[in-house]
Image (spheres, grey):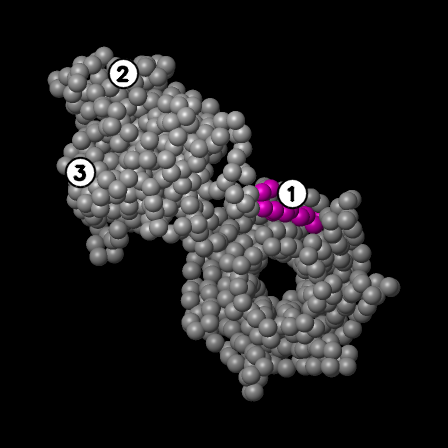
């Protein structure tokens, strides 16, 4: 532990002779790349040390003088600052930091002096995106170049000692490290450029402009034009040479009159800080720096004396300042933008650019979900503008979900089904019918990100039709749909197919309403069972396994029930070789049927589930959250979302229906479900406002939710 940060850090100095010291850092480093919080030049890194609890800290190892001698000034600052931060004296100073937890009283800290020569920038993220010209600090994700300019004047009172310079870098390290470590998912890292400069300008209490007296000669000493534009030139140069997403800088001065002891401009490019830090003292430079960096990334002040109000349109998503002390009242929570504390409120996370953007789609439609590995969830929709979108969740995200991201520019009919499967842990394959009626796929793989889209064969499907996919064994994909001619088709992929997807093939003489969903499950390794509502309104099934030398077997009719044309048949396999299917028949009864080998080749059912009623053809979502357990979801006749459950110990059959926390959706909406670990269910639906909504269930807890996924 360094100081009072809530996580442990590790100093790494790369060997100058062997620039890639993976072996030196042990096997663990080869398995998972380290999370770099801070960089100082090419050789010095401060990494998040997830292997140790924060409390287990110890001073870092002694660095041999022979190694220190090979470091450049920037790298040496990084090492010496880290050595200071891991000292007992530094920890003691943080333990008794002045005015800990007090609400800030630094009006003007976000009140950058306006400059007529400030380069104009687009006023909203959307406009900036259109102009193709992002700012220098639009949101806090990814790499950030950080210039730390320590300004030494011509007099003793304006000069920093070596110890003070190290102290400055240590404090800025701590503030930046806290920001980088707060949301490990956001991939934030700060790439430092520590630059002590000497200027000859005398302090002048009567000067008309305090800042330009030290700032202009300082940027000139760095080799840039001696004016406000030189600040932009400096940070843009840093961004270009360090290849970072963003850049800003901070000027530290001592003995020069300043407008405020610490201030920054909203959206960048610079912070100004006075070493004495007013009544807060140098031991609070870390938190004041982190607070001012919040302004750089578009966060407003939240403390009362700033004159804030709860309105406004701040940050990447243009959201109000809801945690402002002047109006949040008892609802206000701890936050670095409010007080001297290592905390961050939900509003500030949003202002920094973390979380979900807005998404609206048509009704009825669906939000498909897949869990690609334990505690990972990915969802997919096509919005009302015809854009394929995705969002993701994992526990490391501090803003619940992240997204909605445009999926490689994919276009489809508004509200089209975007389906996904995981063919091996952490891999995703996605399917959609494009605007030309062809099926398309894209894929995500660790270390590769998203790739695609690739067209699958020549079959043509109705706009918005559902392409269902199933994984029958690792890396084997099989997909299904009904084309515009009403043929039930399948295609397949496996790594050995060097020429891409094989198919499409019609399954037997299978026919259904054009675009009818064909659902599929794998009840055991390499076994496939598919279900579709045929042209006569009956439910049909077909099966495939490698031993079938003559291809698919079937179709077989399942019972006598009649469904509306094109009805979705929900299917789940609750254990090996057990199949359960679900639908809403033409009479509006929610019904189920079952198959297992002991049934001697015939299906049992259909049975109505506990008097369940819905619009004829209403899709029933089904999932097996652990062995032999079934949960079903449907939008009832009153638009309420209902759930029912079954397990072998229920001697009286299905239990339910229960209203799922009062959630509602349009008729025809499919409620999708994922199991992110055994018995943990997360369900998704497009609500009546066109947003995706989520609810969750885990053992011993009632259903929680519904939560809207984005504003
Ligand atoms: Zn402020």
Please state which of residues 88 and 491 is positioned toward the viewer in this rendering. Answer: 88
| Range of magenta residues | 437-448
Q: Residue furthest right?
A: 550
Residue 303 falls in which quadrant of the image?
top left
**Alpha carbons under labels 3 and 2: distance apart:** 26 Å
Indicate the position of residue 90 as horizontal and vertical percent values.
25, 39
Furthest residue toward top: 200
Mark carried by residue 304: none
- Does the CB distance between marks 3 and 2 fall below 8 Å? no
Mark before the other along the chain sequence, 3 or 2:
2
Q: Quadrant of the N terminus?
A: top left
Query: Whole-Å distance between the Cαs marked 1 and 2?
Result: 53 Å
At 44% from the left edge and 70% from the top edge, which residue is drawn? 703
Q: Residue at x 30, y 21 (%)?
A: 196
User: For residue 362, which quarter of the picture?
Assistant: bottom right
Q: Residue at x 54, y 29 (%)?
A: 18
Q: Nearer the viewer, residue 460 or 549?
A: 549
The verdict on residue 352 being magenta is no
Q: Which residue is mark 3?
A: 280
Task: Decide if residue 32 is in sight here.
Answer: no
Q: Is residue 611 left or right of residue 604?
A: left
Between marks 3 and 1 in the image, the one whose residue lies nearer the viewer? 3
């Amino acid at each position: 532990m360094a100081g009072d940060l809530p996580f442990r850090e590790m100093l790494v100095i790369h060997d100058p002779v062997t620039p890639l010291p993976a072996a030196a850092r042990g096997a663990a480093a080869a398995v998972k790349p380290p999370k770099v919080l801070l960089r100082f030049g090419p050789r010095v890194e401060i990494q998040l040390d997830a292997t140790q609890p924060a409390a287990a800290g110890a001073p870092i190892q002694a660095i041999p003088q022979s190694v220190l001698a090979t470091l450049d000034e920037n790298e040496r600052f990084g090492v010496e600052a880290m050595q200071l931060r891991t000292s007992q004296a530094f920890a003691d100073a943080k333990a008794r930091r002045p005015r800990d937890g007090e609400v800030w009283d630094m009006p003007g800290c976000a009140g950058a002096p306006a400059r007529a020569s400030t380069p104009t920038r687009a006023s909203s993220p959307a406009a900036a995106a259109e102009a193709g010209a992002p700012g220098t600090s639009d949101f806090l994700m990814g790499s950030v170049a950080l210039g730390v300019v320590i300004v030494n004047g011509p007099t003793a009172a304006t000069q920093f000692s070596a110890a003070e310079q190290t102290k400055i870098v240590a404090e800025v390290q701590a503030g930046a490290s806290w920001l980088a470590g707060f949301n490990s998912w956001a991939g934030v890292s700060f790439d430092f450029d520590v630059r002590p400069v000497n200027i000859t300008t005398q302090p002048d209490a009567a000067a008309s402009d305090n800042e330009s007296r030290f700032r202009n000669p300082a940027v000139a000493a760095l080799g840039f034009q001696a004016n406000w534009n030189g600040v932009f030139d400096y940070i843009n140069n840093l961004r270009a040479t360090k290849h970072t997403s963003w850049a800003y800088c901070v000027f530290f001065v001592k003995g020069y009159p300043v407008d405020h002891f610490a201030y920054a401009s909203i959206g960048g490019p610079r912070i100004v800080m006075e070493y004495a830090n007013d009544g807060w003292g140098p031991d609070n430079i870390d938190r004041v720096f982190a607070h001012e960096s919040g302004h750089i990334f578009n966060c407003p002040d939240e403390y009362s004396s700033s004159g804030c109000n709860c309105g406004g349109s701040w940050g990447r998503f243009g959201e109000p300042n809801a945690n402002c002390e002047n109006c949040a009242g008892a609802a206000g929570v701890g936050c670095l933008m409010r007080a001297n504390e290592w905390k961050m409120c939900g509003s500030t996370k949003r202002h920094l650019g973390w979380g979900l953007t807005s998404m609206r789609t048509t009704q009825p439609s669906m939000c498909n979900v897949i869990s690609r590995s334990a505690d990972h969830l990915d969802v997919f929709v096509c919005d009302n503008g015809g854009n394929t979108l995705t969002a993701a969740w994992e526990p490391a995200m501090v803003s619940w979900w992240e997204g909605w991201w445009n999926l490689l520019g994919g276009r489809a009919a508004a509200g089209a089904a975007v389906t996904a499967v995981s063919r091996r842990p952490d891999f995703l394959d996605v399917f959609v019918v494009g605007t030309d009626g062809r099926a398309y796929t894209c894929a995500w793989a660790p270390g590769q990100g998203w790739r695609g889209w690739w067209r699958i064969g020549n079959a043509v499907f109705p706009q918005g039709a559902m392409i269902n996919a199933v994984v029958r064994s690792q890396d084997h994909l099989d997909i299904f749909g009904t084309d515009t001619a009403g043929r039930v088709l399948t295609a397949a992929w496996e790594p050995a197919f060097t020429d891409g997807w094989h198919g499409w093939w019609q399954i037997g003489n299978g026919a259904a309403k054009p675009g009818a969903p064909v659902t599929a499950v794998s009840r055991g390794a390499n076994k496939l069972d598919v279900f579709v509502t045929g042209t006569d309104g009956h439910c049909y099934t077909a099966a495939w396994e490698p031993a079938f030398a003559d291809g698919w077997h079937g179709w077989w009719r399942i019972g006598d029930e009649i469904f509306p044309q094109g009805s979705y048949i929900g299917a789940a396999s609750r254990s090996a070789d057990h199949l359960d299917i679900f639908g809403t028949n033409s009479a509006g009864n929610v019904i189920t049927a079952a198959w297992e080998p002991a049934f001697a080749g015939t299906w049992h059912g259909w049975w109505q589930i506990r008097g369940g009623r819905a619009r004829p053809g209403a899709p029933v979502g089904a999932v097996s959250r652990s062995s032999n357990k079934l949960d079903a979801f449907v939008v009832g006749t009153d638009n309420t979302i209902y759930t029912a459950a079954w397990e072998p110990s229920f001697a009286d059959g299905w239990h339910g229906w229960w209203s799922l926390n009062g959630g509602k959706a349009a008729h025809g909406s499919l409620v999708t479900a994922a199991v992110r670990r055994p018995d943990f269910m997360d369900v998704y639906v497009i609500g009546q406002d066109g947003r995706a909504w989520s609810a969750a269930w885990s053992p011993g807890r009632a259903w929680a939710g519904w939560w809207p996924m984005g504003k």
